Image: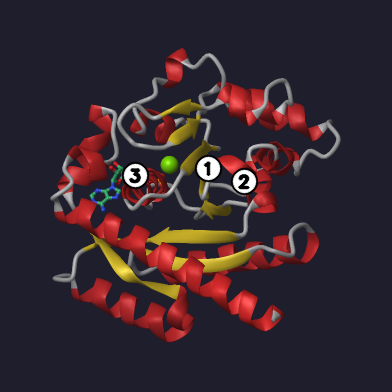
């Protein structure tokens, strides 16, 4: 069974997609088999993986409507080293079509179960809203990774997200956990960012990942070249940070796994 993580934050432009594609590429570099599910009709994770969203033959839309399996609809990212279940504008239609369908919030879960043997990690890039699409992601995930900028209003937005995770945990998915907060686009020279970062650690303790992703222009340039920053310029500070983050996540996940086994025995 793969570890299934949603990359979520109700705000747009906070680094969800950048985190999704670079974490996927970083995990692939350290030997993990990874699938990205693009759940955002903007299709940025699809494009950023080098798959043209305008020429998608099959997409996550077909999977949610149950006309195709994940194995039929996915494709390899040409340079990323992982697979992508792509998305484009068609997906915004699924939102409306799903409303009247049965099991509307568990369709992705069912679909991913059928290809569970193929992956070590599934990363779901969520849209910046709590829509039926995001709900499909949260219903099948084991955890949520929240990328955030250390800005003045960051903590305020977090409360909403933490409450959402609690509600989904209580009503739809007992396995769902807040895995961690990832500080992104970080600039240590900005005093306010340092202060917010300290506040985050005070509030959330070890839910804050040790790795910090710096603001780095190579990460921003990479999507226009159709690849994650980790592949586009592996030696850049941004890429190195994401590779470090991939290692941290693998270590966390295997430590949690050991803990589980220990309590079972
Ligand atoms: P979201 O998916 O949350 O909307 P994106 O990942 O698309 O956010 O990021 C928003 C913008 O910020 C994009 O233009 C992206 O290239 C840029 N960006 C994200 N992370 C970084 C970073 N660490 N350094 C520089 N630019 C970044
Ligand atoms: Mg995005």
Q: Residue at 42% x, 64% y: name it.
A: 249
Kindly identify which residue carries mark 2. 134
Residue 237 image offset from top left, x and y in percent: 16, 56
Q: Is residue 156 visible?
A: no
Q: Which mark is residue 203?
A: none
Residue 195 image offset from top left, x and y in percent: 28, 79
Cα distance between the residues tagged 2 and 1: 7 Å
Mark 1: few/some/many CA within 10 Å (<14, 14-19, 20+): many
Mark 2: few/some/many CA within 10 Å (<14, 14-19, 20+): many
Q: Is residue 78 left or right of residue 145?
A: left
Q: Is residue 45 left or right of residue 39?
A: left
Kindly identify which residue carries mark 3. 25
Residue 251 image offset from top left, x and y in percent: 42, 68
Helix, strand or loop for disc 2: helix
Tell which tag, 3 or 2, sits nearer the viewer.
Answer: 3
Q: Residue at 51% x, 36% y: name it.
A: 38
């Amino acid at each position: 069974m793969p570890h299934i993580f949603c990359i979520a934050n109700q705000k747009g432009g906070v680094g969800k997609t950048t985190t999704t594609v670079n974490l996927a590429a970083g995990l692939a570099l350290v030997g993990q088999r990874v699938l990205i599910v693009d759940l955002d009709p903007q299709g940025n994770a699809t494009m950023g993986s080098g798959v043209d969203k305008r020429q998608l033959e099959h997409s996550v839309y077909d999977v949610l409507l149950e006309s195709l399996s994940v194995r039929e609809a996915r494709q390899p990212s040409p340079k990323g080293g992982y697979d992508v279940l792509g998305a484009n504008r068609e997906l915004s239609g699924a939102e409306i079509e799903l409303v009247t369908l049965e099991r509307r919030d568990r369709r992705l879960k069912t679909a991913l179960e059928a290809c569970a043997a193929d992956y070590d990690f599934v990363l779901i890039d969520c849209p910046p809203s709590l829509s039926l699409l995001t709900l499909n992601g949260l219903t099948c995930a084991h955890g949520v990774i929240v990328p955030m900028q250390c800005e003045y209003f960051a903590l305020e937005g977090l409360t909403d997200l933490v409450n959402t995770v609690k509600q989904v945990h209580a009503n739809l998915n007992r396995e769902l956990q807040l895995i961690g907060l990832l500080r992104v686009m970080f600039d240590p020279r900005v005093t306010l960012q340092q202060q917010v970062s300290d506040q985050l650690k005070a509030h959330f303790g070890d839910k804050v990942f040790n790795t910090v992703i710096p603001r780095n222009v190579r990460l921003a340039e990479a999507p226009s070249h159709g690849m994650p920053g980790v592949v586009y310029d592996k030696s850049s500070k941004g890429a190195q940070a994401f590779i470090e983050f991939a290692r941290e996540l693998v270590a966390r996940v295997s430590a949690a796994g050991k803990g589980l086994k220990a309590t079972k025995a």
